[in-house]
Every structure is written in C-alpha cells, then in structure tokens.
Image (spheres, helix red, strand yellow):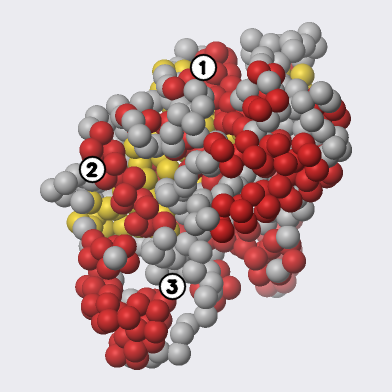
C-alpha cells in the first residue's frame, strides 16, 4: 500500500511539474543576442551578452599604437563588433606558476592569447543609456610592469561587483615589459615617450572611459582607479602624471606601495644597449619595429642585467621594466612635488598581513623566548623588543605568526599615507587584510593577492583561493560594500563594520579585515614599523 501511494504521489508531482513548465514562462537569465546587447561607442557599436542582468563586453579596443610609440584613438568600424570574449593580452615571458601544483590551483591563472594589438578593455554594467550615472571602477592588473592581464585571475571578473553595487566595472590590458618601457628616447622624437608608453596606454583607457562610459550607464565624472601589486603601482603612477589628472576622482592602492620609478639615465642606457644587441643604431633604428618579440625581449632583458650590474657595482639603483621618471610625462614618482598633483583625490591604501612570506613553513621556535633567540640572528638586540611589540599588536596570534609578518609592504603603505598627510587635501584611508585563508590547510594565510576576490565580491568565483566559507562570504560582503561606497562617496564604509576614520597625525587608523573580527586599529603596529625601519 505504501509503495502504491508513493508511486501515485511521484506521478502527480511529475505531472504538476510538467504542467507548470508549460504554463509558466521560463525566466531568461542569459542573453547573447546582438539585438539585446548592442551598445554604442564613439568608434562603433559593440555587442556582448547579458549575464543575470549584467551587460558584459570584452575585448573592446580603446586605443591602438605602433611599437614604442604613443597610443592614439582606435580606427572606427561600421559593423556591430562582437565583444563577447577576452581580447589579446600583451606578449610576455611564459608563466612559470603552473609548475607548482598548489600555486596553480590557488591562483587559477588565465594566460589568454598574446598579441601586440592588446589595447583592449572589458565592461560590466546593469544598464545602457538609461539616464543613470553609475560610479565607474577601473581595475589595473598586477604582475608588476612585466606580466599579467585584465582577465588573469577569476577574482578580476567584474560581474558580481557591478551587480551588487549598481556600478560600472572596467578592466584593461596594456603594453608591458620591453614593449611598454624600453626607453629609446636617444634615437629621436619618434620614440620620445617609449619608456612610458605602457602608462600612456592606461591614460588612453581612462580617456576612453571619459568619452564612452555614459553609453554604458556610467558617470565619467565619478571614476575610481584601483589596482593590486603592480596594479597598485600603476595607480600611484596615475597619481603622479600631469596628463592623467582629471580622468579619475578616487584611487585605491592595494599591496603596491613602495614602488619606485626607474632612473632615466639607466633607462636610456638599457635602450641603447638593446639596440646595439639587435645590431641597430640611429640610422636603422626603425627596423626595431619588425624585430620578432622573443628576440626583442631577450635583448632587452640582457641589457637590463648588464646595466643593473654596472649600477650595482657603484651602489646605485639600476633598472627594471617599469615607469621611467624624469620626463615631462612622469617628472617624479609620487615624490618631489608629483604627489601634490592628485592631492584632492580621496585615497585608500592597504596590503595583506603576510604578503610574500605567507607560505613559509613555521620556524623552529615554539615559545616567545625561542622566537626572540631565533630573531636575534638577523635583528640583533632589537629582536626582544620586536617580539614584545608584535604580541601587543597581534595579541591573539601564535608564535609562528611572527615569522610570517610582512614588514616590506605595510611600512610602505604607512609611508605613502604620511606623504599624503604632508600634501594635505583629501583624506586617506588605510586597511590591512589579515584573514587567514582556509585553503589547503591554511598554508597560504593572508598572502599577496588574497584580498582581491573579497573586494570584487567574488568569494565563490575564487573559491580555490578564498575557501568559500560562510565567514569568507560575510567578509566579502563587507569588503565589497567598502569598495562600492568608496566609489560612490569617497569614504569607505559598510553597515557591518565599525566607523572607518581616515588616517591622520592624531589618529593613525587602519581597518583590520579579519573575517568576523574586523576592527579599526589606531597605530597598532607603529612600534613594529619603527623597529623595522631602524
């Protein structure tokens, strides 16, 4: 009898479900039709797709450029351009991160396909030409100035941030390494800006946002630039470049403080030596336009090594691919008055607790006295005070945590904030990401890159990094709130956080993101930084 009743009930359930499917219209959550997704730009129409209410466009050209020359507006097109998949990324050396199984799992890199025609951007928005003026967030990817792309990590995807905050998210690709920063200015005005064309690309992307983002429901007068690691250094570059001023209105530097521009003399020497290695001189330098990329990169990297060794022998800073300071496009790097250019732009600066030392295995010390003894080998007599101050700053941390503490980026964050205080102007807000990721038994801790997915509201998208725990989702809600509200008002906030006060001389505040235990700290690690700097 029970079996018969079960069969009848099952039959009725199936019939009811089939009837409901016939009578109820299916909810469309994805649409890639050209008619539904066509958007305007100054240069032509583009078609994308709609993902659960978020219009998505990928690989849109924002500029074009000949090798080593400044970018200019892209050529217009007449047909509707399909913009549904990532555009090309800048050529770069092969990614070696895949060689390590745990690292490859953690980061889930998307290497994309490489081509020098890489000046492309991606857009996520909830409305087109609807009269709304949504805040715009423009993301600069990491990888220093040598590698990476706007789609390199799952956490960079702008869909969830755009959906949650009703903001417009833009990510970009631009020229890197030898293509973005080989200074050939000694070979004439044609290559006058070659040492910084990668940065000029970024400025071109911001000009595209200024001129086109209204078509995508965005407000060109409310643009936030943000980036992590090398992307953070790119944000600092924009803060320091005269031609970038007015193109953004808020800025956020993530784990990118402390970067320095390259010596102009060393950069020119690298340019001359690269040309020499390629058999080129002032009479045939234009042939560098057609040198195969691999050959160009090999020669450029050799020149960097030679010049840097020469400068190191004289106790001088050499050269690495990145911003070249001293020209009209970049007079200085957030220094010597350049930090004053954007002093009225609200600024967020932060880093992670463990950065580049997160995956280190615990030291042999198991007690605080043993930690002092072990640290005396490198710190001398200051080790005892360092341990004592660490215990005050992080009273709930175990002994092994002191050996994972980042003391490279955090002091640079504070130094950059202090420079803003001297400049006056808009407020600066500091954060420190201390959430110990549960991924792979917690071996990665609060490592470099680990805060990105939380700000982007991509805790589930980047589950291999975040762990996608309930606590992680709650933290992602708070941190994405912070970014959205910073973009909207210039002040970071979340109803689930304490009031976030700016960093000042009298209140050196830092928001400490630590899962469910987020706190506003006041100069909690000031003595640690002082000891480290000494």
Q: Report the side of 24 relative to 397 (left or right).
A: right
Q: Is residue 20 visible?
A: no
Judging depth in this view, the residue of 179 and 515 nearest the camera is: 179
Residue topped by disc 3 = 404
Residue 210 marker: 1
Q: Report the side of 259 relative to 390 (left or right).
A: right
- SS at badge 3: loop
- Residue 502's place in the image compared with 374, above or below, is above
What residue sits 58% from the left and 19% below the top? 208
Judging depth in this view, the residue of 74 and 459 nearest the camera is: 74
Pinpoint residue 119: horizontal percent, then vertical percent.
69, 28
- SS at badge 1: helix
Label 1: few (<14), some (14–19) or many (≥20) C-alpha neighbours in 10 Å = some
Distance between the Cα atoms at labels 2 and 3?
27 Å
Residue 502 marker: 2
Label 3: few (<14), some (14–19) or many (≥20) C-alpha neighbours in 10 Å = many
Q: Nearer the viewer, mark 2 or mark 3?
A: 3
Pinpoint residue 172: horizontal percent, then vertical percent.
62, 33
Q: Is residue 389 visible?
A: yes
Distance between the Cα atoms at labels 1 and 3?
42 Å
Q: Are marks 2 and 3 in contact (CB under 8 Å)?
A: no
- Residue 104's place in the image compared with 506, above or below, is below
Residue 200 marker: none
Pinpoint residue 102: horizontal percent, then vertical percent.
66, 69
Judging depth in this view, the residue of 35 and 533 nearest the camera is: 533
């Amino acid at each position: 009898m029970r079996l018969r009743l079960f069969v009848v009930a099952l039959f009725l359930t199936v019939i009811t479900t089939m009837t409901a499917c016939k009578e109820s219209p299916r909810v469309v959550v994805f649409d890639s039709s050209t008619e539904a997704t066509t958007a305007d730009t100054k240069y032509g129409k583009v078609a994308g797709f709609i993902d659960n209410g978020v219009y998505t466009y990928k690989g849109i050209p924002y500029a074009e450029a000949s090798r080593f020359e400044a970018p200019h507006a892209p050529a217009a097109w007449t047909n509707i351009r399909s913009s549904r998949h990532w555009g090309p990324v800048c050529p770069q050396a092969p990614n070696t991160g895949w060689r390590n199984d745990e690292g490859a799992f953690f980061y889930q890199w998307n290497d994309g396909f490489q081509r020098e025609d890489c000046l492309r951007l991606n857009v996520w928005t909830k409305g087109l030409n609807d009269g709304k003026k949504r805040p715009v967030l423009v993301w600069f990817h990491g990888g220093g100035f040598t590698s990476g792309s706007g789609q390199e990590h799952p956490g960079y995807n702008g869909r969830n941030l755009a959906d949650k905050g009703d903001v417009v998210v833009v990510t970009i690709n631009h020229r890197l390494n030898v293509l973005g920063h080989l200074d050939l200015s000694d070979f004439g005005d044609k290559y006058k800006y070659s040492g910084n064309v990668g940065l000029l690309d970024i400025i071109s992307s911001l000009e595209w946002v200024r001129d086109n983002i209204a078509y995508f429901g965005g407000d060109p007068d409310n643009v936030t630039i943000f980036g992590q690691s090398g992307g953070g250094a790119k944000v600092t570059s924009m803060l320091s470049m005269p031609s970038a001023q007015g193109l953004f209105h808020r800025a956020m530097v993530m784990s990118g403080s402390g970067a320095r521009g390259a010596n102009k003399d060393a950069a020119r020497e690298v340019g001359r030596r690269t040309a020499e290695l390629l058999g080129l001189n002032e009479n045939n330098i234009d042939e560098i336009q057609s040198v195969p990329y691999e050959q160009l990169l090999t020669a450029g990297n050799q020149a960097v090594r030679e010049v840097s060794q020469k400068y190191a022998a004289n106790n001088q800073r050499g050269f690495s691919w990145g911003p070249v300071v001293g020209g009209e496009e970049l007079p200085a790097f957030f220094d010597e008055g350049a930090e004053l250019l954007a002093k009225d732009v609200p600024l967020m600066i932060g880093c992670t607790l463990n950065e580049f030392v997160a995956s280190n295995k615990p030291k042999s010390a198991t007690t605080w006295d043993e930690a002092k003894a072990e640290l005396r080998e490198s710190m001398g007599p200051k080790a005892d005070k360092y341990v004592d101050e660490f215990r005050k700053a992080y009273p709930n941390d175990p002994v092994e945590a002191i050996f994972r503490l980042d003391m490279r980026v955090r002091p640079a964050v504070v130094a950059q904030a202090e420079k803003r205080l001297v400049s006056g102007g808009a407020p600066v807000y500091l954060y420190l990401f201390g959430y110990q990721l549960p991924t792979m038994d917690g071996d990665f801790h609060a490592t470099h890159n680990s805060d990105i997915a939380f700000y982007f509201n991509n805790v589930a998208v980047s589950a291999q990094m975040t762990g996608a725990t309930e606590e992680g989702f709650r933290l992602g809600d708070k941190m994405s709130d912070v970014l959205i509200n910073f973009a909207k008002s210039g002040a970071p906030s979340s109803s689930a956080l304490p009031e976030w006060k700016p960093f000042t001389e009298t209140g050196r505040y830092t928001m400490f993101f630590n899962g469910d235990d987020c706190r506003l700290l006041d100069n909690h690690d000031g003595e640690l930084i002082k000891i480290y700097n000494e």
